Amino acid sequence: MKLDGQKCLVAYSGALTIGVIAALLAGFTGADGNPRFDTITVQRINVVEPDGTLRMVLSNTRRIPGIIIKGHEYPDFTNRKASDTAGALFFDAEGTESGGLTFGGRKDAEGNVSRWGHLSFDGYDQDQLFAIDALDYGSVKGATIKTWDTPDWPIQDYLDLLTEIQGLPEDERQRRIDEFNADHPPGVARMALGNVRFPDDEVQDQNLLQFHDARGNRRLSATVEGAAGDPVLRFYAADGSTVIEELPD
């Protein structure tokens, strides 16, 4: 059988490429047979189970995914890319997003600064149950720990609705969302612990602890307020009105 020169060159190039790759991998393989590297530079890493189920994503802003439910990725409804989000997203054994550690920040062309971090864990097929947040927007700085009661309906229903109505006029989209909300009660805030500081207006500064009832109504708060750091304890009626306010003597 006669081979022409071009075919010989292709065969030689292929063999050489395979040899180089094998040599490189051999050089980076440890005694346990697993590859080892001093430095890896990537835009995104997917951690998966042997069957391919996604369990964690480490990503920059450009490659960060939209919300993933049972392996299906929805559009970026939460605007992660627009907010310069990067970090790690967590997924349960069904390939559904169940929390994450994300962060972002920059100074824009006008000199306005932003810096924030977020750690959260979600309910099953629902939104977050627990979150820790920190932020610095120059004129306001703060950090909070919050908890929620999440509803029993699957959040996939809401994401399917948002996907379905993307091309509709704004008023029609809002009407469909209002109809959905009428039959799907939202999650409710139950507890918040945090501090908020206003460098240009210390009168608004607050350290606070708040508790809410099962309907999300604020019922008790303990705060340290203003530049003087005055402590205040407040009890609230179900309608949000203050029933008792305790101030220092």
Image (cartoon, grey):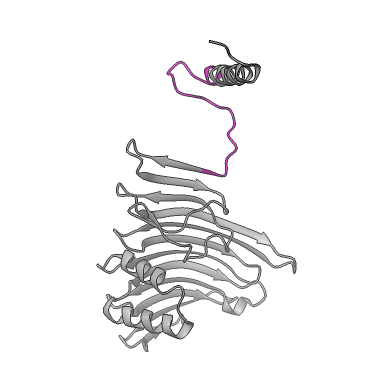
For residue 16, above or below residue 166: above
Which segment is the magenta one? 25-44
Where 248 sits versus 104, above or below? below
**164 relative to 20, above or below:** below
Left or right: residue 25 compared with residue 93 = right
Q: Nearer the viewer, residue 111 or 177?
A: 177
Which residue sits furthest left? 152
Q: Quadrant of residue 33?
A: top left
Q: Does the magenta portion include 41?
A: yes
Query: Residue placed at 57% from the left, 11% from the top?
Result: 2
**Total marks in image:** 0
Per the picture, the main secondary structure of the magenta-coloured stretch is loop
Identify which residue is drawn at 29% across, 78% down.
Answer: 215
Residue sticking out furthest to the top? 1
Q: Nearer the viewer, residue 143 or 63?
A: 63
Q: Residue at x 37, y 61 (%)?
A: 130
User: Picture coordinates of residue 173 (x, y %)?
Assistant: 42, 80
> What is the quadrant of residue 243 in the picture?
bottom left
Front-most of residues 158 and 108? 158
* Foreground residue among 115 and 191: 115
Q: What is the x, y in percent for residue 77? A: 47, 66
Q: Is residue 83 above or below residue 52?
A: below
Rendered location of residue 199, percent (x, y): 65, 71
Whether the magenta-drawn stretch holds residue 203 is answered as: no
